[in-house]
Amino acid sequence: MGFSLLCHSKPAVLPHTEMSSFQALTGLRGICSILIVCGHFFTNFAPVNANSWPSVSLDYFAPVTLFFVVSGFLLGVLYQDKLGEWKQRRVFWVKRFARLAPMYWFSLIFCLPSLIAYYCSEENIWMFIGDLVFTPLFVQSVTLVGNDWSGPLWQISAFALCYAIYPFTLRHLRSFRTAIVCSVVLFLVPLVALALGFTFGWPLGVIHTWAPLRAPQFFIGVILGLHFPHKEPQEVNERSGLTNNIEEAMDGTLEAKPSCIDWATVLLEIHTVILFASFIGCLILGTLQGSQYWWTYMLWEEFAMVPVHCMWIYLLCRSPPRGPTFSFLTSWPMEKLGEISYSIYVLQWPVLTLYSWLKAWGIPTMQSRDRGIKMGDDNTVDGMYVLEDYDLLGVLGVLVCLSFLTNRYIENPARDWLTKRFAPQVSSLN
């Protein structure tokens, strides 16, 4: 998900004053994961006594798109010419599996009581079996069966599909002319599907979560990474080791001097203002006009703003290490959040659920609220709605602490063991 994609590694030994702009992507992952958690909090869990719904109209669809673009971009930068052989592809798939699977399955185990409680009230044994079969296999974003276990994990399923086919696309996407054509097609396909969905009343949630319509954002990021300006390997090795240590940059640990482009910082701040204005616009629109306008805006924006996201990421990784945006994303809190962003994302649903159970002193009854737009079978959204707005601070505190612990004692050890056990020739891809 644009999360920390690669194996844990130690910081490169470089001068403190030299900092790679790739490091800012770590902070970006952190803020995106928090925004998504806040969006799910206000959509499915709070507040209990609101006069209107939603009480806070956060735009949490755009961060999902950013995760796809950033993930594709970083893989495009790293694996440009390193996946031509079968052994290299095998190592790549093992590393991706080691990155996703341990915390994904831990989250499912953590959320199993919620699944059992949900189906005890629904009394649908076949859907329950479908969840148990499809969700652990990472296929719910394709089959559209299995999202009831832990809803946000559809994104991890979509990433797994993208990783599976990624090595076979590199040869075709390296051509600049092919890349331009593919970028346009990949950008238009989800927009056309969304327009058809609104026209014919299709379930728009399918467009939001179906892997074939989310993969285009990932591969647009891949194209951006493949054609991102690079220094010659010899020059890079002599000056900073950036080529050999790009994995550390993706984990937010590499510090190296970026290319200096005078106008890049100004353009970066302009694009930051555009993205922030879109976020505030969604907040105001949902508050003044209601749920239907909020959901409609988020759906269109998450696909239509992809070019802006790409330009923003490009400028972020090409601009000198200065300016408000870079300083914020490379600050200590954002860096630490970015390092645990994957744990935050996969653990959010069980933490939100169990926090609601504790607040209600039991298992609360699921309720429905009018969304005003057809995302699934109807216009409603289901949730527990037993929390108040101020409970968000408690939820975030518990989630961040738990994520730090699982990152240290489950995620990193399991990833390192799987990589060393099944991909011993991993150094060939560094």
Image (tube, grey):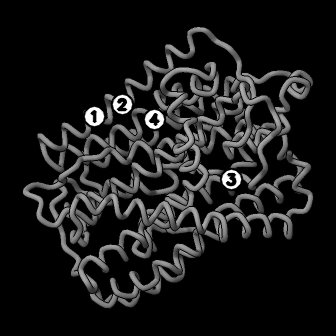
Mark 1 and mark 4: Cα distance apart in space: 25 Å
| Residue depicted at 34% across the width and 73% down the height | 355
Circle 1 — which element?
Answer: helix
Identify residue type, mark 1. Answer: Ile
Question: Could you tell me if the residues under marks 1 and 3 are in contact, i.e. CB atoms within 8 Å?
Answer: no
Residue 308 spot, x, y in % from top left: 46, 27
- Circle nearer the viewer, 3 or 2: 2
Quadrant of the drawing holding the C terminus: top right
Identify residue type, mark 2. Answer: Phe
Neighbor class of circle 1 (other Cα within 10 Å; few <14, some 14-19, many 20+) is some
* Relative depth, front residue between 159 and 144: 159
- Circle nearer the viewer, 1 or 4: 1
Q: Kindly identify which numbered label has been placed on residue 46.
A: none
In this rendering, the answer to whether 72 lies above or below 318 is: below
Horizontal side of 5 relative to 204 (left or right) equals right
Q: Quadrant of residue 384?
A: bottom left
Residue 288 spot, x, y in % from top left: 12, 40
